[in-house]
Amino acid sequence: MTTENGKRRGRFELNEDFPRLLTLLRKERGYSQKKVAADLGISQALLSHYEKGIRECGLDFVIRAADYYDVSCDYLLGRTLHRTGAVLTIQDVAAGEAPRGKKGDSPSVEYNRRVLINSLSIVFGLLKKINSESLTEEVSIYLFAAVYKIFRLLYSSNPKNSQDIFSLDTRMFGASMNSAMAMAEAKSRYVLTGESIGSCIGVKREAIPTLTPESLAKEFPQHAPALMDLIKSVEKSSKSEH
């Protein structure tokens, strides 16, 4: 592999995550390519090639970029979902600490909690922009049902816990929630096409925002990284099951 300085370095393969993360980290901070390129000691054209995945960089650039954005090299290379100093680091795991969480919290619990909360912030941010009561209601029903289902599963796993707080039959609640989620998703898809169904009013096409990873990073700079991690994690898990 030839580096930006024309020197040969140990070869390693950069995957599709590197250009995306390199671009996302820059846009999160509101930096221009010109500034970042100057700070990292390369030309703007070369940085543009790295961000577009046109050229591969050397290991020395990966290290400089990771230090510059305060993330781990493994995160920048797509080998881990955890950022250095942001959510969870290898050092934190080894020390048994949960960064920014309560003392004694499981790092994985703290990390997943943040990913979900931040991702949901974007979902409801988009719902606010679309400004459709029908869509917001259906999306909320879907999410409420998912939380209910998982909470009741956890709650009911101990037979000593009273079931008095629930009214749905123990043997039926799972199917009831699955049905509610499926119907809510179907109605959401329907109204997003602009058509109305029952009491759900269709969404006007112009109300649906045009989105890109870059626009999400710009509009939701504090939450977009978590959503990108969630997308990658879910898709990775899905692929491993096939």
Image (tube, rainbow, N blue to C red):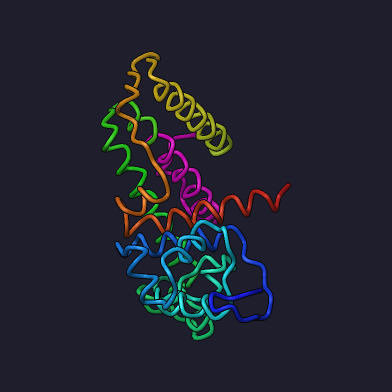
* Extreme residue in the bottom direction: 95
At x 38%, y 30%, the residue is 138
Residue 231 locus on image (x, y percent) = 51, 51
In the image, is residue 149 part of the stretch drawn in magenta? yes
Horizontal and vertical percent for residue 172?
56, 33
In this view, 189 is above or below 164: above
Determine which quarter of the picture holds residue 115: bottom left
Residue, far right:
242
Instruction: Write down the quadrant of residue 211 in the picture.
Output: top left
Which portion, as a residue range, is magenta? Answer: 140-168
Residue at screen point 40% across, 73% down: 69
Q: Quadrant of the N terminus?
A: bottom right
**In the rendered image, the vertical position of residue 134 relative to residue 5, given as above or below:** above
Q: Nearer the viewer, residue 105 or 15?
A: 15
Foreground of the two, 220 or 95: 220
Q: Is residue 184 one of those drawn in magenta?
A: no
x and y, in percent, of residue 200 in the image: 35, 19
Q: Position of residue 226 (x, y in %)?
A: 42, 58
Q: Is residue 233 above or below residue 88?
A: above
Q: Image quadrant of residue 105?
A: bottom left
Residue depicted at x 35% and y 74% = 100
